[in-house]
Amino acid sequence: MTIRHLKVFTAVADMGGMSAAAKKLHVSQPTVSQAIAELEKYYGVKLFERLSQKLYLTKEGELMLSFSRHILDSFNQMEEAMDRAVKKENLRIGCSVTVGTCLINDILDQAGIRMPHLSISVVVANSSDIERAILCNEVDIGIVEGILKSSELLITPVCKDELVIVCGSSHPLAKEKTVTPDMLAGQNYISRESGSAGRNQLEKLFEEQGLELVRTFCSTNTEAIKNAVIRGRGIAVLSERMIERERAAGDMVVLPVEGVKVTRNINLAIHKNKYLSKSIKMMQEIVQETF
């Protein structure tokens, strides 16, 4: 029994005959007769009686008609809803803080030009949270900096990002032409939260250099970190992309630390089993072209 059977049965009941139903459905009368016969055989009942050249529903036919109308109405609603969903497709993007602050709007501008029908939602969080969101199918693609650990992800590097050590213009180290790692030892340190790619790479570097800093300020908010740096609360590590305005204004200084250079990839990440729709493929192209 299929939706086609129910459509034929309901048409026969509504039109009062198989010829009229066939004309309404644009099929042959034998096709209608066969569909009714298949239904009657499937359920082991007689659905119509012919009296004086006219068809009448049996008691079983009336019962089936009540269900058939409900099923066909639900089916039509589903068809309409799916049609609307296709016409207005949604794409979910997860991006890390640097990407969400400095780069995502350029990507969205291009996507708006090339895919004006597409509805895009964006989530900005730290890299580990975005990695988890990709794995749980909470986002369709991720654009993140740093190292992603899961073997379930397909990762494509799209550009480089440099991390720099910064301080406020009034900080004692601000006027130094060159800073040695020893000069950083014991400095107050303003850091990102656990799970941040910048923090993870920085702390690994500090361990390798044998540096011990005093963490006095920890935040998930980059603006809070920058404000604390500007007010002289300590040094921090930020993406060079994220401090262009403060650096140009003279509020923040990049410390040229001897032997310390941290670059990382900004990656496009997608689950290896993700179905690549046309919109996802187009977004992949846009990301790579933009960077």
Image (tube, rainbow, N blue to C red):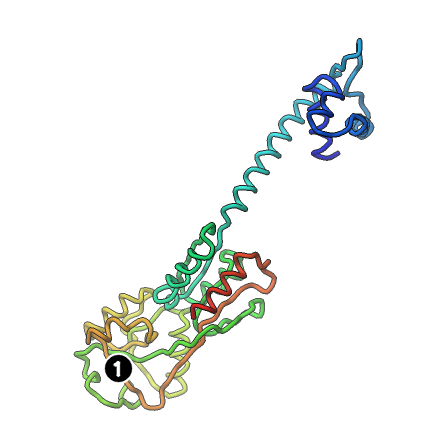
Residue sitting nearer the eye, 159 or 213 = 159
Amino acid type, label 1: Gln
Q: Quadrant of the C terminus?
A: bottom left
Q: Relative to 55, is 181 on the left or the right?
A: left
Count of marks placed on residues: 1
**Figure check: 74 above or below 248:** above
The image quadrant of residue 27 is top right
What residue is drawn where x is 29% and y is 86%? 256
241 lies left or right of 287: left
Between 23 and 12, the residue placed more toward the observer is 23
Left or right: 75 as drawn, with respect to 193: right
Is 155 located above or below residue 89 in the figure? Answer: below
Residue at position x 76%, y 15% from top?
55
Circle 1 SS class: loop
| Image coords of residue 99 (percent x, y) | 39, 67
In x, y percent, where is residue 246?
23, 72
* Image side of residue 33 versus residue 285, left or right: right
Can you give x and y, in whole percent of width and height, for residue 215 in the image?
30, 75
The front one of 230 and 79 is: 79
User: Which residue is at the far left?
Assistant: 170
Give the x, y percent position of residue 234. 24, 76
Q: Disc 1 designates what residue?
A: 187
Is 229 drawn above or below residue 59 in the view shown? below
Residue furthest top as drawn? 52
Q: Look at the image and tell me in which quarter the N terminus lies.
A: top right
Label 1: few (<14), some (14–19) or many (≥20) C-alpha neighbours in 10 Å: some
Determine the residue positioned at 19% across, 76% down.
250
| Residue at x 56% of width, y 67% of height | 153
